[in-house]
Image: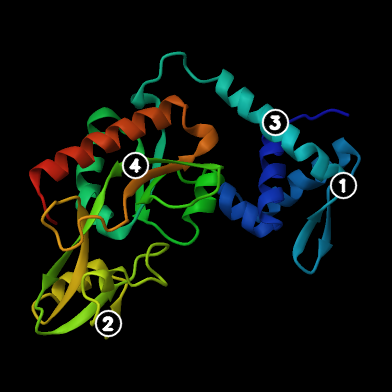
Amino acid sequence: MRITDLNSLHVFLTLMQTHSTQRAAKKLGRSQSYVSKVLAQLRDELDDPLFTRSAEGLAPTSYALSIQPKLHTALEQLSHSLEPEQFSPKNVDRIVLHILEPMLIRFGKRIIENIRQQTDAIIEMRNWNKLSESMILDEEVDMGIHILSDKPQTLSQKKLYNGCGIVMGNTQGEYIKYIASGVNDYENRFQRALPDVEATLFVDNYMLMKELMDIAYTMRHEAYQADSDIPDLGIDTATVQKASKRKSPKNIWLVKLIEKCVSEELKANTTA
């Protein structure tokens, strides 16, 4: 049994995640025919079909299931052994961040500017979405900024600041509930300060909400202010990363950079 190309093992692990040659090809940035060719080669070299077709896609064989965790660990160790002893942001190729929209708008420019001062790496900064947690675990996303909450132990969170609630806008108009993914989809925290208010406008676009402030009002999440409408809103902001990566030099650098940017922005502007 002999593997002639280590890249084929990355293809195998991607197939284990995606259960599809088409999705694996897209994730790897290669053609579907390339993935199929590598799979055929692996089947020959390992003397096992590795996957069988099912209604859900490619189903791994018992052998494939048994070697996946060992291969994943081995490739991680190999990758780690090839990293430079002294970490330098200049050696980073790509940085991917998923950030909850209001925080993306508020902190995004400052974070990008600070990253760019230290590296020419490609920067990909996107809105946090329903797939963000799984993408962090799959290491497609380096880090996120979201609300501190109950998350799997495979994710590590570090609080950036405490949150409060401030009523803003035209209180003679309708109440807008801004829906943030994974935060308040099913909760109305604003009713602690405004128990008699019912939301009649629902939006999930932060810029649209700001445009409506002359005819409507809302409860804004802000960094802690003692004189706010709800000083303890119970919504605190945190960095989110894969637990097993929290001590990696790249992630340590990113957390410190984000903490610095957030602190500077909060000191410069008490509201956004």
Disc 4 vs disc 1: Cβ atoms closer than 8 Å?
Answer: no
Disc 4 vs disc 3: Cβ atoms closer than 8 Å?
Answer: no
The residue singled out by tag 3 in the image is: 6
Instruction: Characterize the local packing of mark 4: few (<14), some (14-19) or many (20 or more) Cα atoms within 10 angstroms.
Output: some
* Lower sequence index among marks 2 and 1: 1
What's the residue at 11%, 73% (across, down)? Answer: 169
The residue singled out by tag 1 in the image is: 62
- Label 4 vs label 1, nearer the camera: 4
Instruction: Characterize the local packing of mark 3: few (<14), some (14-19) or many (20 or more) Cα atoms within 10 angstroms.
Output: few
Left or right: 171 with respect to 234? Answer: left
Label 1 to label 3, Cα distance in Å?
21 Å
Label 4 to label 3, Cα distance in Å?
39 Å
* Residue type of the residue flagged with mark 3: Leu
The residue singled out by tag 4 in the image is: 159
The residue singled out by tag 2 in the image is: 199
Disc 2 vs disc 4: Cβ atoms closer than 8 Å?
Answer: no
